[in-house]
Image: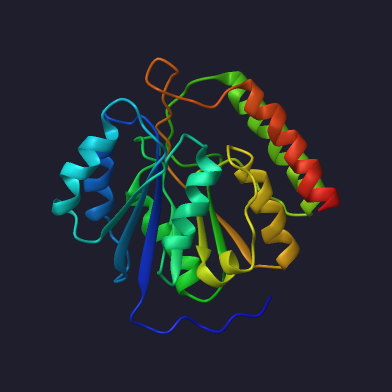
Amino acid sequence: MQLPPIEPPLLLSVVIPVYNELAYIEEILARVQASDRFGCGLEIVVVDDCSTDGTRELLQELQPKHPSMKLVHQAKNEGKGAALRRGFAMATGHIVLVQDADLEYSPTDYPALLQPILSGEADVVYGSRFLGGPHRVLYYWHSVGNWILTNASNTCTNLSLTDMETCYKVFRREVLENIEIRQNRFGFEPEVTAKVARLGARVYEVPISYAGRTYEEGKKIGWKDGVKALWCIARYGLRD
């Protein structure tokens, strides 16, 4: 895949899928707004996935404070992949970055994530939680599960990622324009990875910080999503 250099002025679209994040959404929007974007303009695309805890109403209140924010509400809860699909369709930036709505991933890592694309070295950048950045110590079996899924994905895609399941994925918009996302939930991660590999896009990994949260603090992914991820790895990595 041969892409021309991105000509300035540059616009970064940060796509944020949101579901029941009342405790965190105001803070993450403030952190994204305040992030260092290497001189890129900012567009924030927030897709509320039919929240039921007051997140939707708070987002409507916050919108006037964030003139760069586009806000859309899903008619029903469909999952992270569906919300990202909607957000990608609305994004107009030269570069598109996925940001979770909680505080596990810090926008202070944006400069490291953007640099390989801005320098012309990469088309896609993954932020790895396992390349040496500071991180909160939590569930051992989650790290084992992530290792299994990442290596299964690598076996099918012939990439050498250390963290396929990371939230922080950054794309030149031309890459997303050549990918059709079908998965509605967390199957998005292995699906988009397989399709990026098939395109022949130049993929980089950079270390990021990670402040994981517990299930009591609102973590949503579970073992069933891990099983579905294995199915998606086989589906999109081997047969699609």
On the rendered structure, is 215 left or right of 221? left
Identified at 30% across, 25% down, the residue is 53
Quarter-wise, where is residue 149 in the image?
Answer: top right
Question: Which of the two residues, 161 or 101, is positioned nearer the viewer here?
Answer: 101
Identified at 53% across, 19% down, the residue is 139
From this viewpoint, which residue is outermost toward the top?
A: 216
On the rendered structure, is 77 left or right of 123? left
The answer to whether residue 106 of the structure is visible from this angle is: yes
Residue 197 percent location from the top left of the image: 72, 60
Identified at 36% across, 83% down, the residue is 8
As displayed, is residue 200 above or below residue 212?
below
As displayed, is residue 158 above or below residue 51?
below
Identified at 59% across, 60% down, the residue is 204
Question: Which of the two residues, 58 or 167, is positioned nearer the viewer here?
Answer: 58
Residue 96 percent location from the top left of the image: 45, 62
Residue 66 percent location from the top left of the image: 19, 55
On the rendered structure, is 124 left or right of 91? right
Question: Which of the two residues, 57 or 201, is positioned nearer the viewer here?
Answer: 57
From this viewpoint, which residue is outermost toward the right?
A: 239
Question: Which of the two residues, 117 or 230, is positioned nearer the viewer here?
Answer: 230
Residue 133 percent location from the top left of the image: 46, 42
